[in-house]
Image (cartoon, rainbow, N blue to C red):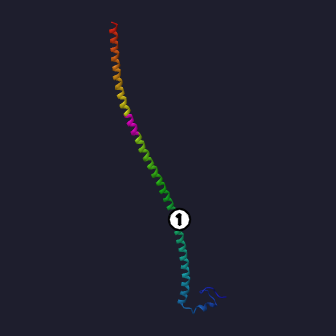
Amino acid sequence: MSGAFITQAGHNADQFRGIEVGELEALVSGIAQTSQSTLLLKKKKEMREVDDSLDFMKQQFKSRMEACEANQRKFEVKQQELKENVLKFEKFIQENDAKRARAEIKYRQEKKTRKQKEAELQKHIEDLDKHQKKRAD
C-alpha cells in the first residue's frame, strides 16, 4: 500500500525522487491558487453582503428622509395656516378697536347732545313756570 503523501514513508517514495523542486512548487502553487481563488470568492461574497447591507441602509435612510420631508411640508403648511389665522385675528382686533373708538366718539357726542337737550328742557321748564306764574298773577 502506498502512501498518499509525498513525505510518507513507503516503497512509492522513490517515484517522487526524480521530480524536481520546480515541479513540486508548481503543484504547491496550484493548491495555493485554489486557496487564493477560494479566498477571493469568500471576499467577493463578503463584499456582496456588505453592498447588500449598504443598499438596505441607503433605502432606510431614503425612507426616513422622505418621511422627514413629508413632515417638514406638513409643518410648513400648518405654520402658514397659523400665520393666516394670526393675520385674520389681528384684522379682527383692529376692526373691533375701530368700532370701539367710533362707539366712544358717538357716546361722547350723544352725552354732550343729551346735556344740551336737558339744559334746553330745564330752560323751557323754567320759562313755562315763569309764564304760568305771570298768568296766575
* Residue located farthest toward the right when viewing the structure as drawn: 1
* 25 in relation to 105, above or below: below
* Residue located farthest toward the top when viewing the structure as drawn: 137
Q: Nearer the viewer, residue 111 or 28?
A: 111
Q: Secondary structure at mark 1?
A: helix
Q: Residues within 10 Å of mark 1 (few under 14, many from 20)?
A: few
Tell me which segment is drawn in magenta: 93-101
Percent coordinates x, y for residue 59 in the rendering: 51, 63
Which residue does the image show at 34% across and 14% down from the upper left? 128
Which residue does the image show at 32% across and 9% down from the upper left? 134
Q: Nearer the viewer, residue 131 or 90?
A: 131
Which residue does the image show at 37% across and 29% down from the upper left? 107
* Residue located farthest toward the front when viewing the structure as drawn: 135
Q: Quadrant of the N terminus?
A: bottom right
Q: Tell me the residue that label 1 is attached to.
A: 56
| Principal secondary structure, stretch drawn in magenta | helix
Q: Give the tally of numbered discs.
A: 1
Residue 112 highlighted magenta (yes or no): no
Percent coordinates x, y for residue 45 in the rendering: 55, 73
Which residue does the image show at 44% across and 47% down from the upper left? 82
Q: Nearer the viewer, residue 71 or 1?
A: 71
Q: Amino acid at mark 1?
A: Phe
Percent coordinates x, y for residue 15 in the rendering: 60, 92
* 128 in relation to 98, above or below: above
* 29 in relation to 46, above or below: below
Q: Is residue 134 left or right of residue 7?
A: left
